[in-house]
Amino acid sequence: MLALAWRNVLRHARRSALTMLAVALGLCALIFLWGFNDGVHNAMMRNLQEVIVGSLQIHRQGFFHHPRLSDELPNPARVHALLRQRGLDRYADRLRTFALAAGADVSEGLVLLGVHPALEMRVTRLAQKVAKGRFLRDNDEAACVLGRTTARNLGVSVGDSLVLLSEDRYGALAAERVRLVGIIDSGEMGIDRGLAIVPLGFLQRMLAMSGRISGVVLQLPRARLEQETMALRTALGDGYEVLRWYDMYPMMKQWVELEDGFYYIFLSIVLLIVAAGIMNTVLMSMLERIHEFGVMLALGCRPWRLAGMVVIEAMILGFAGVLLGACAGLLLVSYFHDAGIDLSHQMTTITRFYIEPVVRTEINTEHLVDTVCSVLLAAVLASVWPALRAMRLEPVEAIHHV
Amino acid sequence: MAMIEAEHLRKHYRSGDARVMALDDVCLTIEAGAFVVLAGRSGSGKTTLLNMLGALDRPDAGALRIAGHDLLAMNADERAAFRLHHLGFVFQAYNLIRVLSARENVAYVLQLRGMGRRERLSLADHWLAEVGLAEFADRRPDQMSGGQQQRVAVARALAAKPDLVLADEPTANLDSHTGAELIDLMRHLNEREGTTFVIASHDPAVIASARMLVTMQDGRIVSLEER
């Protein structure tokens, strides 16, 4: 039956080739668009995690949404030991509070983040975002890195001094003069405005928080995120919160899901067009062969077998189109993954969403599989009506069909 | 033993407002191994009767048994299975499958019967040799003459060893010489294999070859002549 179906497809080779090309073109376009979409989304999510948020953060229960200096991470040594035991070595301690930064004439409220410079550089890419000066070093004491907007608002530049004012663990005023060693230009408003980064040890002393931290940030492979989150939550218990990046910033995940939803709608529309193309070819092919179908029925071919042959013909067209389209689509995705698509002129206003101005296409396996399977399914569904028509043919009428 | 037992078959068609009686109280018994020609003018009912005998169409009334099977008790799927296992067809316009070679056309029915590839191709070659077309086995229908195509059709009809071969105007598209050769071939196979042949034709050469001649007119059998 397969051989007969194959020869029937070749019977009108040009028409079949055009249908196959239409399927291939549709699939290729879908794969490329998914590649662009996933490239933007994955870069956004990677940037968010790699620049500052990390894959996971561990705090005292409730700290992330209501941060208070006194809500320090219980028993940091236990958390460190657990992470090491699970083979998670890309983590860094952080101490976080609110402060007032005073320049020569202006002051501004901001988040004061104490980090261990060497460990932080293993976990996030904050250091790579320094546009002027340098990032913190392990032997720095009263040093500070500011975001570009904050530095501009305070009127300070690299080498200048500024004063940081906050409350220590006992509620007493804590003030320190620090020297600005670097200015970060990340393109992300939450970092460039309202953030000051200082050495962890310095901040602990300033706030009478010696040996105490607010939380741990860690980086881990995407494939391990869910599994490790569950394991850490179970091991640490109720006193801790183990938050994935999207638990902390759900809007980004929701935005990605919304855009994926839009793409699935687009996919459905393209599938309808693909299905119509296949159905047109299969139906024309079937109507041209009514007489031959009548002969086959007369010879004893069962109607379901005839219908099966029509479905197989559509599947051959679908498979060939999918094979060609998938190869072309993946080649395009691969090419633009390396070459990139430079949209910097169009994206000056939305870099704050962690979007890279040069989009590198990549496609998530689930989207590739969904798309390929959908096109194949569309090919099968497109053949149902012609197959039913073939199945319902009466041999006598079909034989005399002209 | 009776191969065909038709009793009081009736069939009518609608043509506009008119009611055309295609078969009118047809009774016919044909023994196994017979070589029967249904003769009559166009519209006499011979093709309609052939369609009934071929389980391709159903009568409005009457009873019909072929090789001991009651055709009227069968549904469409059962009739298809019956055709596959008991009947062979030779059509006026040859009706070979265009995309298949002569060998594959003959083997097609054997494939439908579930025979393995090697066995059915071997059997197809045997039958092509029987009809004198061994060297044409790989040719497609459009690479053969009408006479050659009709010989392939005969080989296809006989390859599965059916109880009954039905042929509708098999010589109509052939020149007289080729037509005579085809009739000789069918007669020869009828005598050698014992297969029952029922041929609808108004070709005098075919009529002359009949061992039993059934003449029809206006849907009725008007004469039945054993020779």
Image (cartoon, rainbow, N blue to C red):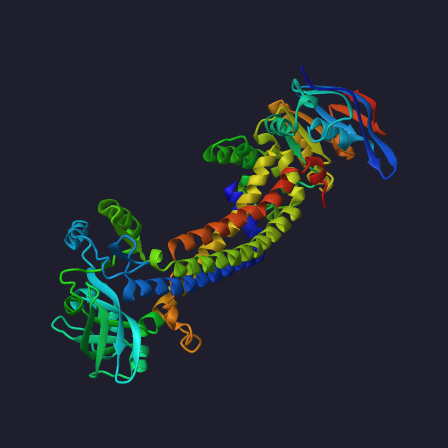
Residue drawn at x 28%, y 85% as measured from the top left:
A105
- Tell me where residue B123 appears, x and y as whole percent: 51, 32
Name above or below for residue B80 compared with residue A72. Answer: above
Determine which quarter of the picture holds residue A94: bottom left
Name above or below for residue A139 compared with residue A321. Answer: below
Q: Is residue A263 visible?
A: yes
Which residue is at the front of the view, A274 or A200? A200
Q: Is residue A328 visible?
A: no
Which residue is at the front of the view, A327 or B122? A327
Residue that sits furthest to the top in the current view: B1
- Tell me where residue B24 appears, x and y as whole percent: 83, 25
Residue drawn at x 24%, y 68% as measured from the top left:
A113
Which residue is at the front of the view, A287 or B51? A287
Name above or below for residue B191 compared with residue A220. Answer: above
Residue that sits furthest to the left in the current view: A139
Determine which quarter of the picture holds residue A155: bottom left
In the image, taking residue A263 as reference, residue A353 lies left or right, namely: left
Residue drawn at x 54%, y 40% as measured from the top left:
B104
In the image, taking residue A97 as reference, residue A280 lies left or right, namely: right
- Tell me where residue B4 appears, x and y as whole percent: 70, 20
Which residue is at the front of the view, B8 or B120? B8
- Tell me where residue A25 appears, x and y as whole percent: 50, 61
How many callouts does the rendering have? Answer: 0
Determine which quarter of the picture holds residue B215: top right
